[in-house]
Structure formats: C-alpha cells, structure tokens
Image: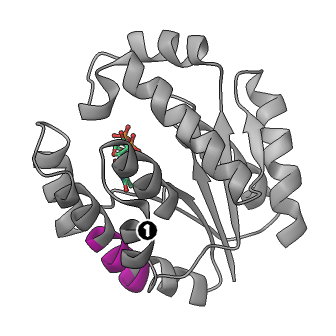
Amino acid sequence: MRWIVLEGPDCVGKSTIIRELSKILQEQGYKVYITSEPSDSPIGKIIRGWLLREKVDPPHIYALLFTSDRYYHYHNIVKKMLENGYIVLQERYKLSTLVYQSQMGVDEKWIEELNKYVPDPDIMIVLDADIQVLKTRLESRTRRELFESDISMLCKIRQKYLEVARRMRLPIVNAARDLSDVVRDVYEIVSKLL
Ligand code: TYD
C-alpha cells in the first residue's frame, strides 16, 4: 500500500506538486489516484457549501465535520483505491484539522482522539514557504475561502504546521523555489516507498 499525503498552508502549492508527482509516477508505470480533503462526499459538500463560506460557531463544528468527511473518504474511497493497487496522492488529512482547528481554539487532544480510528498514511510531507511568498500568492487569488481571508491567520497556520512537523519529525519541503526543485525533493522522499 502506498499512500502519500501532502500538507501545508493555503497557497503553498500542494495541488501543483501532486499533479507533477503524479505525472512522474505514471510515466514509471504506476497507477496513481489523486484526491483531497475536504472530499467530494456529501459531508465534503456541506463543508464547501457552508463551513468555508461563513464563520460558524463553535469551532468544534469544523473539527467534527472535517473529521466525519475524513472517515467517509478514507473508508469509501482511499482504502479501496489502495487495495486496488493505486498509489494514492492526497492533499490534506489529519494534520489539517490539528493545525487549522487548534488555531481556531479547539483542544488538540480532542482532535487527536477524534481522529484515532482512521489510519496514518505511509508518508506525510509538509510543504512550507516564506510568509511573503504565501501572501503574494494569496493576493493573486480571486476567490477566497474562509481561512484565506487574512494574512495573520495564514501566518499562524504556517507556524503551527512547522511546530507540528518538527514535533512529529515529518519532512518539511521548502516550496518557495522553482517547481522542478520542489518536485525533485518530494519525489526523493516518495521514492523510498516505491
Ligand atoms: P483547500 O485544500 O485549501 O481547498 P481548495 O482546493 O478549495 O483551496 O481546503 C479548504 C480549506 O479547508 C483550507 O483553508 C483548509 C481548511 N481545512 C480545515 O480547516 N480543516 C481540515 O481538516 C481540512 C481538511 C481543511
């Protein structure tokens, strides 16, 4: 089973890196499945259509809904694709809830408890970029979601990702470089699984 998750703040380039990585793996003959959270499940649709459009209180609702979407998505999609021999490349997973919802004031221990019954992926990589780079990329976006509305939140999210990644000894890749360099570094980490 090969399940790779890319994490990191908004605008760091997760989906671009996943697309490039997928091309490389497919050229090598691997079957690749790309997915992300929030997913396309009915719960994911509630998240995108409601939670990410307005501020909802208390923030525990975010932790609960993102985590419900995760349980659905893992058991109904990811697990099956892995069993069918696909390499699953996924954007966001447990760490997103830990980082974003703890920044909203939700207790980390409770978030970890909620996420106890979905497994960890084989590899988790955190993409990072200087706050100035993230800010420039954010400002060029026309449509913005809840957490993309202010720079101070983006800054806190980035710091929290770095803190959690160091604590969990996860690889951190600097994504504020040429795309080919970032992809090369991510591929190097992933290739250990192949
Ligand atoms: P994102 O991957 O940025 O979606 P898009 O492809 O539309 O840019 O995810 C949407 C937002 O949801 C992002 O700001 C992070 C947030 N989020 C959480 O707050 N908690 C979570 O558990 C997840 C999965 C995402």
Q: Report x, y in % for residue 62.
A: 23, 55
Residue at 11 percent across and 36 percent down: it is 54
Compared across the picture, whether 179 is left or right of 155 comes to right
Which secondary structure is most common in the magenta stretch?
helix
Quarter of the rendering containing residue 109: bottom left
Q: Is residue 90 visible?
A: yes
Q: Report x, y in % for residue 10.
A: 46, 33
Q: Report x, y in % for residue 166.
A: 73, 49
Q: Is residue 70 magenta?
A: yes
Residue at 17 percent across and 59 percent down: it is 61
* Residue type at tag 1: Lys
Q: Report x, y in % for residue 150.
A: 32, 19
Residue range corresponding to the magenta coloring: 68-76
Q: Is residue 72 above or below residue 178?
A: below
Q: Residue furthest bottom?
A: 83
Helix, strand or loop at mark 1: helix
Q: Quadrant of ligand 1?
A: top left
- Viewer-closest of 106 and 116: 106
Quadrant where the image shows the N terminus: bottom right
Q: Is residue 176 magenta?
A: no
Compared across the picture, whether 186 is left or right of 69 comes to right
- Viewer-closest of 61 and 11: 61
